[in-house]
Structure formats: structure tokens, C-alpha cells
Amino acid sequence: MSSKRLPDHWSRKAKAEGYAARSVYKLEEIERRNRVLPQGPGRVVDLGCCPGSWSRYVREKGGRGLTLVGVDWQAVPDYPGVFVERSVLEVTPAELLAALGGPADCVLSDMAPFTTGSRFTDHVAQMELARCAFDLALLTLRKGGHFVAKVFEGEEVNPFVAAVKQRFTEVKRVKPEATRNESVELFVVGKGFRGPLPTTGPAA
Ligand SMILES: C[S@@+](CC[C@H](N)C(=O)[O-])C[C@H]1O[C@@H](n2cnc3c(N)ncnc32)[C@H](O)[C@@H]1O
């Protein structure tokens, strides 16, 4: 059996603390180092939220006044917010904004594709999800809001980070301690959304 299947420190900790997944400690570290989540009433989108550990953590941070919208094509029983059971590729900014009741303070994406074992194929599939999350973030965040997206190492990461830098004032790559040693995943954290681009009027 590969070490990936063995419960490690983080899996045991998640089980002991009642979280559905060890990935909660990735968000905990991202939050500790970057402060991206509202600490009270606010609006958060969690893309790829199943089985729900990030969402539960966000709810614990923000309390009952926080509005949380989660999207996943796998159902999450007892979701602690508004749950949209669909592919993120089919979700529109308008429906997220309607579910949130206004622009988001933070858009999170821990989405991951079904991996094939081909590093290149998995990287390309992962970057499609990250770009989709970025596009949704650009159309749902408030000015000054924050964005977190999982990516897999590969040639498309640098152009992705460059695109995020154009729209956020501070951008970092974070590899949390809870990420497995053999994993190619890392997180791109964009802080301080510069705001929507001005729309150009119809051509005269
Ligand atoms: C690593 S898990 C997320 C774990 C979650 N952050 C947690 O802590 O519980 C990745 C999730 O992305 C979801 N996902 C992958 N592609 C998706 C897509 N196109 N639309 C919606 N969800 C997707 C998967 O169903 C899976 O639940």
C-alpha cells in the first residue's frame, strides 16, 4: 500500500477533532499566515467544498452571521451554508452573488480533478479548475477581497500567478505543512482584489 493511504499525523488530528478531511489544516495554515477569512459577518465562497472540512472551518471562524456558499458536484450532507450541487464549470457568477446576498469577501478553491497518474495531464486538468475559480472570483469578489486556489506544479503555474498578480495587490505561493511530502500541490493566495475592470461602452 502506498504511504498516501496510511493515516498520518494530519489525518489522525482531523479525526480526533471531528473534521471530515485532513485538508482543513492546509486552510488553517493559509489563514494563520495570510488572514484571508472574515472573522465575523462576511461572505465566503468555497469551490470544491466536499466533504466539508474547509467550510466547517470557515463557519467556525465567521460565526453564524457569515454567509457561506459551497459548490461541489458531490453532495455534502448537513452543509453549514448554502450548497450548490453542480460542477463549478456550470456555475455562474450571478447565481453565486444571489446566494451570497452581495459580493464575496473571500473565494476559496480546493478543487482537484480525478487524477490519472500522468503529471502533465493532471496539471492541465487542475489548472482548468484553478482558472475557472479565478474567473468566478473576479466576478464575485468585493474590492479588497481575497482569493485562494489550489494548483499543481507545472508550466502553467507561473502564467497563472502572473494573471493573479495583475488583479490582486499581494500574491503568494503557499505549500502548507499538511500537504503530503510527495504532493505536487500548492496554493496561490491573492490578497486585496483591485476591483472589477471598468467596462467599456458600446462602440460608437
Ligand atoms: C480535495 S477535495 C476538497 C476538500 C475540501 N476542501 C474539504 O476540506 O473538505 C476536492 C473537491 O473538488 C471537487 N471538484 C473537482 N472538480 C470539480 C468540479 N468541476 N466542480 C465541482 N467540484 C469539483 C471534488 O468533487 C472534491 O470534492
Image (cartoon, rainbow, N blue to C red):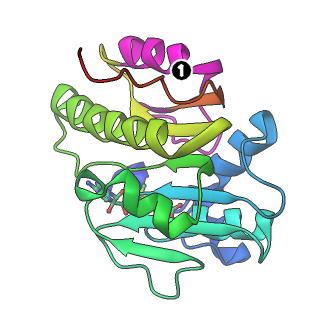
Residue 130, horizontal then vertical, whole percent: 37, 37
Instruction: Judge whether 50 appears above or below 190 on screen.
Output: below
Please tell me which residue is depicted at 46% across the width and 49% down the height of the picture.
Answer: 110
Q: Counting other residues with Cα less than 10 Å from the Cα at mark 1, is it few (<14), some (14-19), or many (20 or more)?
A: some
Task: Residue 165: say if magenta.
Answer: yes
**Residue at 39% across, 63% down:** 95
Q: Mark 1 points at which residue?
A: 167
Q: Where is residue 98 in the image (x, y as percent from the top left)?
A: 47, 66
Q: Residue 116, located in which quarter of the rendered image? A: top left
Q: Start and end of the magenta stretch?
A: 157-186
Confirm if mark 1 falls within 8 A of ligand 1.
Answer: no
| Amino acid type shown at disc 1 | Arg
Residue 5 visible in the snapshot: no
* Residue 126 pos. (x, y %): 29, 37
Depth check: 181 or 93 in front? 93
Q: Quadrant of the C terminus?
A: top left
Please tell me which residue lies in front, 163 or 99. 99
